[in-house]
Image (tube, rainbow, N blue to C red):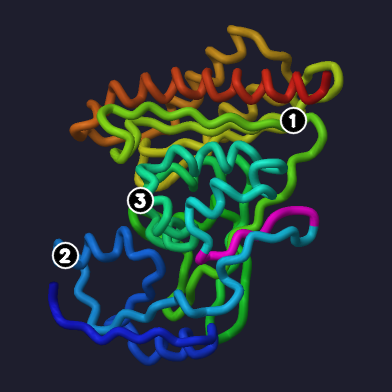
Amino acid sequence: MHAFDYTAPESLASALAELEEAGDEGKVIAGGTALMILMMQRLVRPTRLISLRRLPGLGRIEVVDGGVRIGALATHRDVETSPLIRSRIPVLAETLSRVATLRIRNVATIGGCLAHADPNQDPPVTLLALDARVRIAGRQGERQVALDEFFVDYYQTALRPGEVVVAVDVAFPAPGNASAFHKFLPRTADDYATVAVAATVTLTPEGVCREARIGLGALGPTPLRARDAEAIVIGERLSDRLLAAASEAAIRVVDPIADPRGSAEYKRQMAGVFVRRALRGAWDRASREAA
């Protein structure tokens, strides 16, 4: 590990000022589960680490404007065990419960997960399906970005120099809405998924889909939306033919790479399989909610 300065400011304003002062030589750190590995591999070599751990309020999970606001410093375990999340947005708690191991979930933060922008992570997949929005702070003030506009490229986000993620907002599900998350692990629980899919559907009382969102992970340079597949299921009732058509549409949008978790072609086919599973799971849950 190379030498670096470490600071722990006690206000967001101070942290942003330090980040601006450090420029390209500074990195913010929260849980550090990704950054420390990158530093030990010498892929990044900051001369200053600015810890966000002492910033007040950024670990809260609270109701705001008809939804839940998850502070950037909330750990995966915080979200997984939150009574508010478990009762109102259970698919998010389910997703977080399946991330790596308990040791990682106790340290890794939601804000760090999003800012890191690894396309193989699980939480962004479900947050995409839930139409989440990222709250970002900089010296010029705060702004909000839809999650499907936040990820720009491989390990790249819409964060501007000197900005940090401060929270993610997720609306509470509407009546008739439900979600499901499915992933395939090739080896152990702490490995990345070969493929991960989350689907959200909103059904009419007659069982017709009026809204749908499908998030895909580990299948491209960023977490992906299967927009063509979403368009296919809207206005339709559940059927095997419908799921097959949505599956084929999803396969066309993915761009996986071959790695130890599977060949590119294998991942494409698995994407279709898991889109069908996630859509059926979300549809079944929404149907039970409507009953």
Q: Position of residue 195 (x, y in %)?
A: 38, 31
The x, y position of residue 210, in whole percent, is: 76, 29
Side (left or right) of 257 relative to 209? left
Q: Residue 40: which disc?
A: 2
Percent from the top left, x then y, of residue 18? 41, 89
Mark toward the start of the polypeptide (3 vs 2): 2
Residue segment shown in magenta: 66-73
Quadrant of res 99:
top left
Left or right side of 251 for 4: left
Q: Which is the main secondary structure of the residues drawn in magenta?
A: strand
Left or right: 63, with 220 as reference point? right
Q: Residues within 10 Å of mark 1 (few under 14, many from 20)?
A: many
User: What residue do we see at 54% from left, 37% from top?
Assistant: 94
Numbered circle sitting on residue 59: none
Name the secondary structure under disc 3: helix
Cβ atoms under marks 3 and 1 closer than 8 Å: no
232 or 205: nearer the viewer: 205
Question: Is 149 situated above or below 131?
Answer: below
Image quarter of the C terminus:
top right
Q: Nearer the viewer, residue 7 or 139?
A: 7
- Mark 2 and mark 1 lie on one chain; the one further toward the N terminus is 2
At 60% from the left edge and 56% from the top edge, which residue is drawn?
146
According to the image, label 1 marks what residue? Answer: 202
Which residue is the site of mark 3? 103
Mark 2 belongs to which amino acid?
Answer: Met
Q: Estimate how packed mark 2 is, as few (under 14), some (14 to 19) or many (20 or more) residues with alpha carbons within 10 Å.
A: few
Q: CA distance from mark 3 to mark 1?
A: 35 Å
- Judge by depth and name the residue closer to the eye, 184 or 276: 184
Q: Residue 252 placed where, x, y %?
A: 43, 27
Q: CA distance from mark 3 to mark 2?
A: 19 Å
